[in-house]
């Protein structure tokens, strides 16, 4: 595989680059440029010590964004600047990461902008140590790195070689090309490598006349984030999308449809050979029996529409032979578990992800037209909850779970079909 192919996962990603005090900070200028060359958008947070080595203006010119340095920046904090940066980031990379910053992160401190952003972020976090070889081998530094790795931080390096102080040993920051590749790898779990995955997303429009239609509040964001996460996990993703205003995730094959019938036809046409199907689309259950060729005029105080059932796409996919591993979605306003378990069994699904639409948790509105969601996932003999988070984070967690359940179910199709 061409190494540049792996860097495609950086395209469109939001990378927050943290720069701490150390001579290796000069390399971070080239790192910023290379991340942008790979298609990432970069914002830079510098500690006060870092500004003694390289000026913020350098990184502003290279990133194309203002550089952030102060936690108590009155203008930024009026809009909760550190929270906004934490939510913006798809990944946080601290390069170079000094011994002091590593220690402060291990202690859970948030008394400067960089550490506060790390505490507030749900994105993948990585650090590239850079320090004198004696400082690197000190027991306290090793213990602090152990703590960060146990908390889920990815450690990039350090490398062995000649250091600015004239000594030779471990402690050098990795080279820029290594850091770019390692950052790209944050978005590639490989858990669905070469798996063919078909997913539906968004609402459907059921025409009443040339002007009016029946639809719902789905924005399609959850489905698009799942398509992105599946592609990052190595899957070959086909996305059948209802009418939405969203950009296609990189590397995803997109098919646009409008009505439930259109979506059904597209799904069935592309179903052969698919190994996983995820039905996130909010497909209209009913459509008008007759679509009027001209706009209906307002003649009476009431208007009666005769509605007929649309095909149940996820149930049809689950009934296909051969069939993929089928994951459904249940958006409910009440009795979440009851309705989700009923659909799981009645439609013969392998998994179902249920979310309560219109609910508010931890100050966040969940579900339709929101950047946040929370899921309760059920399968035969098990369940797991995914706590409230940005939809991108929820999607990655769900794809990880789907990949795990899919692997467990490989070779057990007869028992699945009889469930």
Image (cartoon, grey):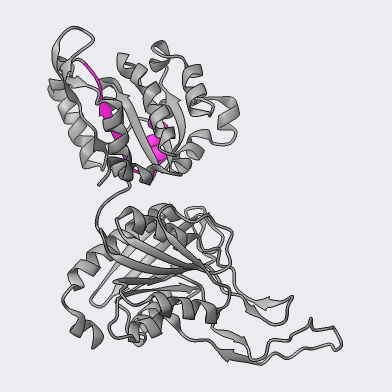
* Rendered position, 209 above or below 112: below
Residue located 67% across and 90% down the image: 290
Give x and y (percent) for residue 121: 40, 41
Pick whichever, 382 or 90, lies toward us: 90
Residue located 23% across and 76% down the image: 381
Q: Hey, which quadrant is residue 124 in on the image?
A: top left
Give x and y (percent) for residue 379: 28, 74
Q: Hey, which quadrant is residue 216 in on the image?
A: bottom right
* Rendered position, 236 above or below 107: below
* Rendered position, 125 above or below 238: above
Pick whichever, 419 or 385, lies toward us: 419
Q: Is residue 196 left or right of residue 87?
A: left
Q: Residue extending furthest front?
A: 2
**Residue 69 visible in rendering:** no
Give x and y (percent) for residue 207: 66, 80
Q: Is residue 224 left or right of residue 246?
A: left
Image quarter hosting the C terminus: bottom left
**Residue 317 visible in rendering:** yes
Pick whichever, 220 or 294, lies toward us: 294
Span colored in magenta: 115-131
Pick whichever, 175 or 76, lies toward us: 175
Q: Hey, which quadrant is residue 218 in on the image?
A: bottom right
- Is residue 127 on the magenta stretch? yes
- Is residue 125 on the magenta stretch? yes
Residue located 36% across and 16% down the image: 26
Give x and y (percent) for residue 410: 18, 72
Q: Is residue 11 left or right of residue 417?
A: right
Q: Residue extending furthest top?
A: 166
């Amino acid at each position: 595989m061409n190494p540049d192919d792996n860097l495609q996962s950086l395209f469109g990603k939001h990378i927050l680059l943290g720069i701490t005090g150390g001579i290796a900070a000069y390399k971070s200028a080239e790192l910023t440029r290379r991340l942008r060359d790979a298609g990432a958008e970069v914002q830079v947070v510098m500690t006060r010590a870092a500004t003694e080595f390289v000026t913020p203006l350098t990184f502003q010119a290279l990133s194309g964004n203002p550089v952030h340095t102060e936690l108590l920046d009155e203008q930024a904090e009026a809009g909760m600047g550190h929270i906004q940066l934490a939510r913006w980031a798809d990944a946080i990379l601290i390069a170079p990461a000094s011994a002091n910053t590593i220690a402060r992160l291990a202690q859970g401190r948030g008394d400067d902008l960089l550490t506060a952003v790390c505490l507030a972020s749900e994105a993948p976090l990585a650090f590239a140590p850079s320090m004198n070889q004696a400082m690197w081998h000190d027991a306290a530094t090793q213990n602090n790195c152990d703590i960060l790795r146990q908390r889920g931080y990815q450690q990039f390096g350090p490398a062995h070689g000649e250091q600015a102080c004239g000594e030779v040993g471990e402690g050098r920051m990795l080279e820029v090309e290594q850091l770019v590749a390692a950052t790209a790898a944050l978005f590639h779990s490989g858990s669905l490598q070469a798996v063919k995955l078909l997913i539906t997303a968004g609402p459907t429009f059921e025409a009443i006349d040339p002007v009016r239609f029946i639809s719902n509040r789905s924005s399609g964001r959850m489905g698009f984030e799942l398509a992105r996460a599946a592609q990052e996990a190595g899957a070959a993703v086909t996305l059948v999308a209802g009418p939405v205003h969203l950009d296609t995730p990189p590397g995803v094959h997109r098919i646009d449809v409008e009505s439930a019938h259109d979506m059904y036809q597209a799904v069935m046409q592309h179903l052969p050979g698919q190994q996983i199907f995820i039905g996130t689309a909010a497909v209209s259950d009913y459509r008008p029996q007759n679509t009027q060729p001209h706009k209906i005029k307002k003649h009476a105080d009431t208007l009666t529409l005769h509605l007929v059932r649309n095909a149940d796409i996820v149930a049809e996919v689950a009934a296909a032979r051969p069939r993929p591993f089928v994951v459904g979605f249940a958006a409910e306003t009440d009795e979440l578990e009851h309705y989700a378990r009923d659909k799981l069994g009645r439609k013969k699904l392998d998994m179902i992800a249920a979310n309560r639409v219109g609910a508010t948790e931890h100050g966040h509105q969940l579900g339709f037209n929101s950047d946040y969601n929370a899921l309760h996932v059920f399968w035969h003999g098990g369940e797991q909850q995914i706590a409230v988070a940005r939809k991108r984070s929820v999607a990655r967690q769900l794809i990880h779970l789907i990949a795990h359940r899919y692997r467990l179910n490989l070779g057990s199709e007869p028992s699945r079909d009889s469930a």
